[in-house]
Amino acid sequence: MDTDKLTAATAGVAVESGFATSSTPHPLVNPATLALSAQQAYASQLYPGRSLSPEDIRMIIETESYKAHHQGHEGKHALMFLIFVCVLAMLPSTVTYWRKRHPMSYRLVSVGSICLIPVYFAAVNYYYRFVCIWLVYALANTYVLYMATRIPLHVHTPRRVYRWFAFINKASYAVFVGGGLLFLLGFFNIMPGLTDTAYYVETSMLTVFYGLYFGLMSRDLVALCTDKMAATLGYSSRGTRIATKFLPQDVCCICGDRLGNSSGDGGERVVADGGMLAAASTSRHPAAHGGATGSFATAEPTHALGCGHEFHASCIRGWCVIGKKDVCPFCSEKVDLHEFKRNPWDKQELFYVTALEYMRFFVSWQPLTLLFLTVVFWLLGLN
């Protein structure tokens, strides 16, 4: 007797025995192994009196095959679920401990997963538009990282690095807001025939994703650059965070530029060039610069922290808000980030930063957690 006849006979025995009509298939019969005619007979016995299409038969066979394959695995499934819940419960505290005790390895793993996991899934699923945008972004940031890691550090490198990432941060935020507005227009169907199409919804969601993803990448990359440049400048030791070099009173230790001399009208400081983060800087005030040529210099606002150290306002905003540092660059004293919430636009920016941290979970820690669970299940034989 050939295989098809044998499986058909087995199905017939199952039907006659009453196993095929029960909700749980016979443990010796996997419907997926039956011939097509036997599968039709099997499905007809499960749903007598119904006219079943080939698609209905396929779904019935897949469902019953799944039940047959997992029959008697209730204990295994309960153990897998228990492990899954325990891992999720321990994830926040584990990540927090890792970030505090081993910040460099945490940052490298976080940046690596954020940079590589999305582009990998985009490549294997043929999303070439995202891959092309990612490659352009990666090439531009490779040059910026190269500048930030040079020793000795060029005098204008910190200013250029922060200016670049400030631009990317603003651009990502604008893309995120624009995508959110497009999504709201589609949600309320403001323009029927356009906002209710699948292409419009997909475009709005992709725009939100791009704004969050590239904003998140920029924040992590600028944090790496900040650490490297701070170590190169050498105002504090990496291990003890104690200042090891004297900081002149009229120098911003973030960018290395002078804060300037008094202009003679109440102590306003005058500098020869702009701050390190021109895109994030507050307004500048022109001040006359005495000289035969009649040229003008610009006075950039400065900001003094609670510890007494003074910096360019744009530099310290870049360090704290974009660079994700909550300590003084010189003495490592804690900084109150509420000092930078001076207008509604700044508050919206900080809400965007919170959204980026949620994005980190979905892009980085969720895939890594699933990978960890897969390895644990494989080691325990819980397939």
Image: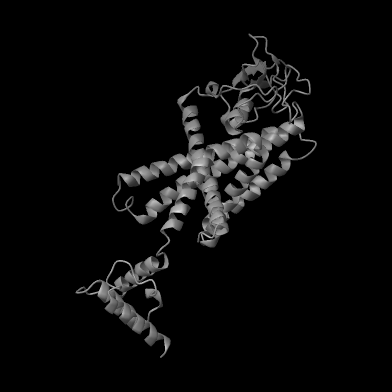
Question: In this view of the protein, which residue sits in the foreground, 208 or 86?
Answer: 86
* Residue 128 image offset from top left, x and y in percent: 53, 59
Residue drawn at (78%, 24%) of the image:
244
Where on the picture, by quarter, is residue 329? top right
Horizontal side, residue 97 vs residue 203: left or right = right
Residue found at the far left of this picture: 49
* Residue 257 image offset from top left, x and y in percent: 72, 25
Q: Give above or below for 375 relative to 356.
A: below
Residue drawn at (72%, 44%) of the image:
146
Q: Give above or below for 5 relative to 91.
A: below
Where on the picture, by quarter, is residue 185? top left
Quarter of the N terminus within the rendering: bottom left
Number of callouts in the render? 0
Residue found at the far right of this picture: 152
Whether residue 374 is visible, yes or no, is yes
Where on the picture, by quarter, is residue 181? top left
Whether residue 172 is visible, yes or no, is no
Question: In this view of the protein, which residue sits in the foreground, 292 or 122?
Answer: 122
Horizontal side, residue 348 vs residue 169: left or right = left
* Residue 311 image offset from top left, x and y in percent: 66, 21
Question: In this view of the protein, which residue sits in the foreground, 160 or 364?
Answer: 364
Residue found at the far bottom of this picture: 1
* Residue 69 image offset from top left, x and y in percent: 42, 67
Residue drawn at (68%, 42%) of the image:
144
Horizontal side, residue 258 vs residue 200: left or right = right
